[in-house]
Amino acid sequence: MRKKKIAAFLIFTLAAAFFAGCGHSESSEEKNTSGKKTFVYGVTNFNAENGETDINPHNDSSGWACIRYGVGETLFRFNDAMEIEPWLAESCENTDELTWEIILRENVNFTSGRHMDGEAVKECLEALVKEHERAAGDLKIEKITAQGQTVTIQTQVPVPALLNYLADPYGCIYDVQEGVTKDGIVCGTGPYKAVSLITDTNLELVKNEDYWNGEPKLDEITIRTISDGDTLTMALQSGEIDAAYGMPYASYPLFESEKYTFSSCATSRVFFGAMNYESEITSDPAVRKAICMGIDKEGFVETLLGGNGYPAQGVFPENFSFGGDAVQGEPYDPQGAKEVLEEAGWVDEDGDGTREKDGKKLILRWLTYPSRQELPLLAEAAQSTLKEIGFEVEVNNTADHSSIRADKDAWDIFVSAMVTAPTGDPEYFFTYRCLDSSSGNDGSYHSDELEKLEQEMMQTFDTEKRSQLAVKMQQTILDDHGYVFCSHLRMSIISKANVTGLAAHPCDYYEITADLDVA
Amino acid sequence: MRNRTKRKLILFGALVAILLLAAIFAQVISPYDPNLQNYEIALQPPSFAHPFGTDRYGRDMLSRVIAGAQTSIFSTLLLVAVISVFGTLIGVACGYLGGLFDGVVMRISDICLAFPGLVFALAIAAVLNGGIQNAVLALAAISWPKYARLARSQTLSMKNADYMMAARLSGNTPLKMIVRHILPNITGPVLVTAMLDIGTMMMEIAALSFLGLGAKPPTAEWGSMMSGGRSMLQTYPWVVLTPGVAIFISVVLFNLLGDTIRDYLDPRSTHGK
């Protein structure tokens, strides 16, 4: 009897502890008693896995965090139509093919207190090309000179998209003399100033009292890295955070009420696969073609993304003149894919459902990573449709994809998500991913035709002509089946209804601005 | 009292047998192909056509839970069989031979016991790159010492018994001694330990799969099914709850059966509740 009483007591205690754990934690507003206006922003992607270890724009992809969270600003920026316009710069003149004369705004100071003049910008850009490999490759800067508020950039070869590149997050201008702290904090010109940063955990910001473009409305902001989508969901539900970026689609229905606001926008982020030309399997053109024909993009977008995107034809989304249907990829055609494989000699002789050729099984090693939650879904969806045409797909879904990718014998297709036109200009994708000289050409793709077109692109300043070239270049890689483009993403920021001024932007750069406010 | 234990043994034995039969004949009794995707019926709540609902790929959850039974239960049984046989043999060898061999092996087992089991298994599974076989291997690598210790202590206690002396004097080789006289005598305790271990091991395999180091897609396995659906716990709960309940029921059944077998085999036991 006594034992039963003890058992009942224990069960009661456990149950009480369990339900206590479910209780609402205090919301960020309630916490704030000092009269300060604060805001907590939960994001899934500000982490080392995405190359965003800190907010130093010259470090890997950390520029994204620098610009998104209102610390840094670039000389030029994109408007909602993805057209380039001056930001820290006032104007720009192209005196000849190689020379750009940029006039800076007068009234801008860094959060370190220093005035942003030509010399400061020169120092920052010189440090950029020294420290950031991709930036150096994009900008091809020969010499920078500064005088007063004027910066003159001379390039080694014509770089028609120079202003677009300067609008890339790596182009955030910060005070190089003040330097980078050991935590990776820089002093930019944005509406907020970073005070502390712990990689993969949080970033604390305070208002920049001296901001040049209006008064920031909040006193303190916390950017909290919550890489797990479910934790993010619960954090927003409990009121622990005020807004969330990277919410899993499965959680959207939970926030479809007047208590929350969605700000959505089609972006140039594409989910795509790069074929490995050094693999025995994907070096076969027929196999590559069959893969391109064997992925049900429509079903993936409609069902698994819940309509938050649209199927991709090529590299760029439809809001670009050179994107959307301007090119033609392979349509979903399982029957056609089977014929392609059949003709190339891939036949299922032993009847196990997987085709073989010369004693080799048609096993496709699909490498992807979990931090973009759509990617594992795409892998499992493709696994099923490709199985029907005779592939056996082995999915390797790992955060450690970088080291595996470096070993060309360890994978056949690498499926990732990428913003293909972060600079609003088409050249970037090709120079970064598809050329012999590209740092991100994971699958060792090579095309003489593409190299030739790129030579032409490098010399072309006319936007119209660049668009035409972009179409040709896309069609080249699509015809080679070197890449398969699955879908473009519609991204959403979900915030509490009392949050204003937080809007999704097509280039996915600008999130925290001086307009952000909490009612 | 003993009759009551016997009745319980039959009841739980029968329930476990049903579970095992369902696992063995998974392919036959599944109403649909567990890996067949059909987006048109994605995320449907439980209905007559799909008693457990469907997941986000439109796969029938009932079929997947049944197919998952095969993966989960058989890998658990395989794991327990491997560690109990392997562990027992090592333990008997240590106990019988003694000396340096015993010392070295027991220190290795001490090292294994000093680690938190799941963390160690996690590390091994990560090195081996996931997959259900590797999860079993990883758990086996850390779980054998329990049996080795048990078998060793049993062997030591009977090594110097009179009947062992007699057997030795009548010219039996060490191998024969172990096979004929020691193993039969320690089967009972090992069996009971193994039965009680099944539930724990099933949970650990599910845990590894939940963390992405067990079964790989599209293999249906209860732990990975829960992991895949966990973002839908609030919106489409059946995707997570059905495999969860399946784990719960199986673990409880195996534990109850283990308990009952222990009571049944232990003649001194009077608390056959």
Image: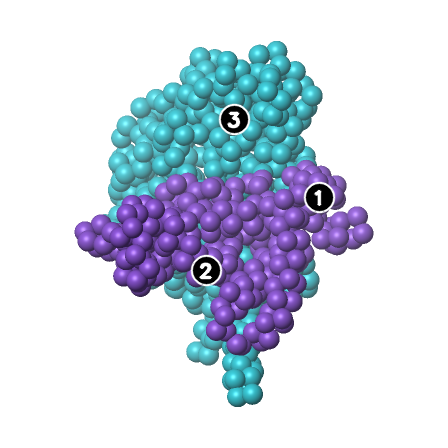
Chain colours: A cyan, B purple
Q: Callout 2: 10 Å neighbours few (<14), some, many (20+)?
A: some
**Image quarter (top left, top right, bottom left or bottom right) of the N terminus of chain A:** bottom right
Number of numbered tags placed on the structure image: 3
Residue at 56% x, 60% y: name it.
Answer: B254
Sequence-wise first label, 2 or 1: 1
Q: How far apart are marks 3 and 2 (CA)?
A: 46 Å
Residue at 64% x, 20% y: name it.
Answer: A337
Q: Which residue lies furthest to the bottom in this view?
A: A2
Residue A156 appears left or right of A294: left
Q: Name the residue under label 2.
A: B188
Q: Name the residue under label 3.
A: A363
Percent of width and height locating residue A234 = 55, 63
Residue at 60% x, 17% y: name it.
Answer: A349
Q: Are marks 2 and 1 on the same chain?
A: yes
Name the amino acid, label 3.
Ile
Q: Mark 1 points at which residue?
A: B30
Residue at 51% x, 50% y: name it.
Answer: B76
Q: Is mark 2 on a helix, strand or loop?
A: helix
Residue A159 occupies quadrant: top left
Query: With respect to residue A212, does A418 lie above or below?
Result: above
Q: Residue furthest front?
A: B170
Percent of width and height locating residue A6 = 51, 84
Check if mark 2's residue and mark 1's residue have beta carbons within 8 Å: no
**Image quarter (top left, top right, bottom left or bottom right) of the C terminus of chain A:** bottom right
Name the amino acid, label 1.
Ser
The reply to whether residue B260 is visible in this rendering is yes
Query: With respect to residue B245, does A65 lie above or below?
Result: above
Percent of width and height locating residue B55 = 67, 48
The residue closer to the viewer here, B133 or A150, is B133
Residue A447 appears left or right of B49: left
